[in-house]
Image (cartoon, rainbow, N blue to C red):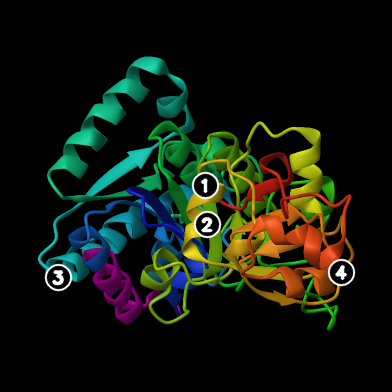
Amino acid sequence: MRDFSKTKRIVIKIGTNTLSRSGGVNTDYVRDVAGQIASLVSAGKQIVLVTSGAIGMGAGRLKLPGPITEMEMRQACAAIGQPLLMAEYHEAFASFGLICSQVLLTAEVLNNRKTYLNLRKAMETLLRLGVVPILNENDCVSTAEIGTAFGDNDKLSALVASKLDADLLILLTDIDALYDADPRTSPDAKKIEVVFEITSAIEQAAGARVSAYSTGGMKTKIAAARIAADAGCRIVLAHGKTERVLERILAGENLGTLFMPRRKLGNRARWILNHAPEGTITIDEGAVAALRKHKSLLPSGIRGVEGRFESGSVVLLNAIAKAVTNFGSDELKSLAGKHSSEIRSLLGTGRRDVVATPEDIVFLDY
Ligand code: GLU
């Protein structure tokens, strides 16, 4: 389980493919997302929505088959599609009693300190009013940002998450997670549930994937994740069509891929985090609370042991932390629930008196 209970400010990005249905917006989908956002807002969360789909909607209205590559045509399509897109959102949010607003951005606006500060004030005011700001790139005027690999809404959403100090960025897409290989061509491809560090192996796993109207692909999502992670923001990449996806992510379900924010970790902690666990030790709530206060893990807090491992192995603690254990799995089974003073009588002398020290325990969240 992931813990998003303290998450307050969330940027949600929805891609063109997720939103559209044969040349137009999927109205049912927009309504469904609005409903989920409404329940998050009533639970006290602040939501900023970044939406794509303007160019696709404009192209649909003009009955143009995709992809639209000519720059002027993309500008024209965006100008036609953006108000249509907003009309859908307005109606959907209104049906849940929420007001939404349109904010169109360019890279220049974010880069310039004065306009950025202006934007920030406006956004803070909107959020204070309980309004959902809906952001998109101002595609009609910021031509450098569309149709090239440089600008896309994945990046835009990450920059916004970073500049607004969001706690979480959710990228809703048409892929259910990041895999260690391309699942369309490699049947053995495995889903990556948590990325602790965006390494070059992760970037390679992402490859490139683009489609008719949208600009991004998995590659741009990893680049976006990197921007947000560097700003201390967590990122969840998930399939936008998963039922109640937003509510379930916030409830801590392991949907999609979670990217952890970059932390200043020492070498040992990084080694522990990046090491595949060889087993799991289940510990009680008291032990979890003690570990959060940088105390050692004692045998008395252990409730169960799964897997076979030696002392010195990296193991999971309740799926919330990883640790290097001073005891092997069989030893831990006999120590579970016992007082530290009993270690000697159970296992003989010369053994450590704790299962893991604080230096050897790393929490998966922060
Ligand atoms: N801003 C573009 C649109 O609304 C989409 C950019 C992207 O797909 O990342 O159509």
Disc 1 vs disc 3: which is toward the camera?
A: 1
Q: Disc 1 on helix, strand or loop? A: helix
Q: What residue type is labelled 1?
A: Arg
User: 249 or 283: which is nearer to us?
Assistant: 283
Q: Where is residue 350 in the image (x, y as percent from the top left)?
A: 89, 50
From where the camera sits, is residue 277 visible? no
CA neighbours of label 4 inside 10 A, class few (<14), some (14 to 19), many (20+)? many
Label 3 neighbour load within 10 Å: few <14, some 14-19, many 20+: some
- The one nearer the camera, 93 or 248, is 248
Q: Distance between the residues labelled 2 and 3?
A: 39 Å
User: Measured from the top left, where is residue 287 in percent x and y?
Assistant: 54, 57
Residue identified by numbered label 1: 292
Give the quadrant of residue 189.
bottom right
Gap between marks 2 and 4, in whole Å?
21 Å
Secondary structure under tag 3 reads loop
Kindly identify which numbered label has been placed on residue 11.
none
Q: Give how far across and how far down residue 183 sits, in percent.
A: 77, 77
On whether residue 366 falls in the magenta region, the answer is no
Q: Eyeballing the image, is 349 above or below 316?
A: above
Circle 4 residue: 309
Disc 2 marks which amino acid?
Val
Tag 2 near tag 1, CB within 8 Å: yes
Residue at the image position 66 percent from the left and 61 percent from the top: 299
Compute the Cα span from label 2 to label 1. 6 Å
Residue that label 2 marks: 288
**Disc 4 + disc 3, Cβ < 8 Å:** no
Q: What stretch is highlighted in magenta?
A: 22-38
Given the image, on which type of amino acid does mark 4 rest?
A: Phe
Lateral position of residue 362 relative to residue 180, left or right: left
Farthest residue in the top direction? Answer: 114
For mark 3, what is the residue?
Answer: 96
